[in-house]
Image (spheres, rainbow, N blue to C red):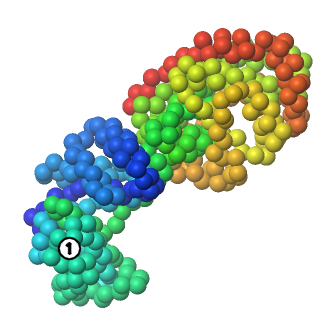
Amino acid sequence: MTMTALGEPSVLLKLGEVVLKGRNREIFEMRLRANIKHALKDHRVDIRQRHGVIALFLPAGTDVEEAETVAARVADVPGIVLVHLAWRVPKDPDSITKAAIELIRDSDEVARKARFAVRSRRRDKRFPLRSNELDRVVGGAINDTYGLPVDLSRPELTVHIEVDKDEAFLFTGGRPGQGGLPVGSSGRALALLSGGIDSPVAAYRMMRRGLRVDFLHFSGIPFTTSESIYKAYALVRNLDKFQGKSRLWVVPFGKAQQSIRNSGQDRLAVIAQRRLMLKTAEEVAHRIHAEALVTGDSLGQVSSQTLANITAQDHAVDLPILRPLIGLDKTEIMAEARRIGTLEISELPDEDCCTLLAPRQAETRAKIEDLKQIERRLDAEDLAAQLADSIQPYKLDV
C-alpha cells in the first residue's frame, strides 16, 4: 500500500451501550478511555473522543502491523462493539477518492470483480458534499478504475468513509469488540474461581456488565497438590486482558474440608462446604470493598445446583450473589469459554478441592436448619474469618 495516498493508519472504536447513558454518558466514556489507555500502555497512542466514536491516532510512520496489533488488543476492552483499522486522510473529496482507490487496490474483491458499495457518514456537516454525493463521487472513481459492479443492497465489498472534524477516515472492515459496559463503571465484585469451565465465564460476563472482578480460589492444600492454583493463576492471567490489574487470592481450604467431612453429614457435605466458601468470600469481599460475589452456578447443571440448594447458599451470606450463567446450558458455556480463551486451560487435569468431598449421593433439597447445625458445630463464622486471614495473594506477571 502506498502510504502517500492512504495517509496514516489509525484505529476507530465504535461504542454501544455507553452512548445510551444520557447525562451519565461522560462518566462511562471517561472510564472507557482510562481502560483503553491501560490496555495500550505498551503502545504510543493518542486517544481522541468523538461523538459515539473513539479514535486512536498512532505516531507518524507507524506500520500496518503495529496498527493491527493495537486494534487486536483494544478489541478485548469491554464497552467497545466494533474496531476498525482505518486510514486517516485530509478531508477533501480528492484526497478521499484517491485513498479509497488505493485502499482496495490489492484486495481479493478487486481481483475477482466483486460487487461493491460506498457508505459515507459526515460527522462534520460543514463538509461540502453530502453523504450520498460523496458516495457517488468515490463509487464512480472506483468503478472507472477497477470496473467493479455497484450493488447497494448486498455488496461483497464496502468502502466506509467517515468525515470527521479535522480529517476523514476510510476502512473496509472491522472486528467485533466485547460490547457491554466499561470495567469499573458498575463497581467491584469478588468471583469464586474454581479450575473448571463455568466460573471464568461467569467472571467475564460480569466484567462486560461493568464490574471490576477480583478472584478467590479455594485450594485443597495440604491434601492436594498446587495444580489447581497454577490453573487458577493461568485463568486469571487470561481474563486479565479484559480488565487489567486483576487480583488473585488463594485460600488453603483442605483442613476446613476435613472438618466438614468429619461432621458426619455426608449428603450435606457439598452444600456445607459451599456455604463456608461463600462466608469466607464475603469476609474477603468486605476487606477489599467488593459489593457482590460472583459464582458460575447454572440451574440444574449438577445435582448440587438445584433451586433448593441455591437458596440454601444464598442464605449463608448477606452480600448479593451474582450468577450470570444461571440459565445457560453446558454447551453454551463451553462455547463462550472457547471464544474468550479459557476453555483449554479449564480442561487441563488438576486435583480440584471439591473431589475431597464427593459423596456417593449428594443432597438435592438441603434444609437450611440442618446446614446451620453443621455450622454451629464447626463455629463457621470464626472459621470463615480464620480462612480469610490465611489467604495468599498471587501477583500476575502481565
Vertical relation: 366 (above or below) 21: above
Residue ID at (48%, 51%)? 180
Q: From the viewer's perspective, is residue 290 above or below residue 128?
A: above
Q: Position of residue 65 (x, y in %)?
A: 25, 53
> Residue, x 51% and y 19% (percent of image)?
393
Q: Which residue is mark 1?
A: 100
| Quadrant (top left, top right, bottom left, bottom right) of the C terminus | top left
What amino acid is found at the position of numbered circle 1 in the picture? Ala
- Residues 242 and 257: in front is 242
Query: Does the image show residue 157?
Result: yes
Q: Quadrant of residue 304?
A: top right
Quadrant where the N terminus sits is: bottom left
Q: In this rendering, would 367 be left or right of 52?
A: right
Q: Report whether 278 appears left or right of 259.
A: left
Q: Is residue 274 above or below residue 131?
A: above
Determine if residue 195 is in view: no
SS under mark 1: helix
Please tell me which residue lies in front, 334 or 120: 120
357 relative to 343 in the view: left or right: right
- Residue at x 62%, y 36% (from the top left corner): 294
Q: Residues within 10 Å of mark 1 (few under 14, many from 20)?
A: many
- Choose between 208 and 224: the one closer to the eye: 208
Quarter residue 151 falls in: bottom left
Across and down, in percent, residue 209 comes to 52, 46
Point out residue 336 in the picture as x, y percentages from the top left corner: 57, 51
Q: Nearer the viewer, residue 322 or 341?
A: 322
Number of numbered discs present? 1
Residue 326 percent location from the top left of the image: 70, 46
Q: Residue at x 40, y 50 (%)?
A: 23
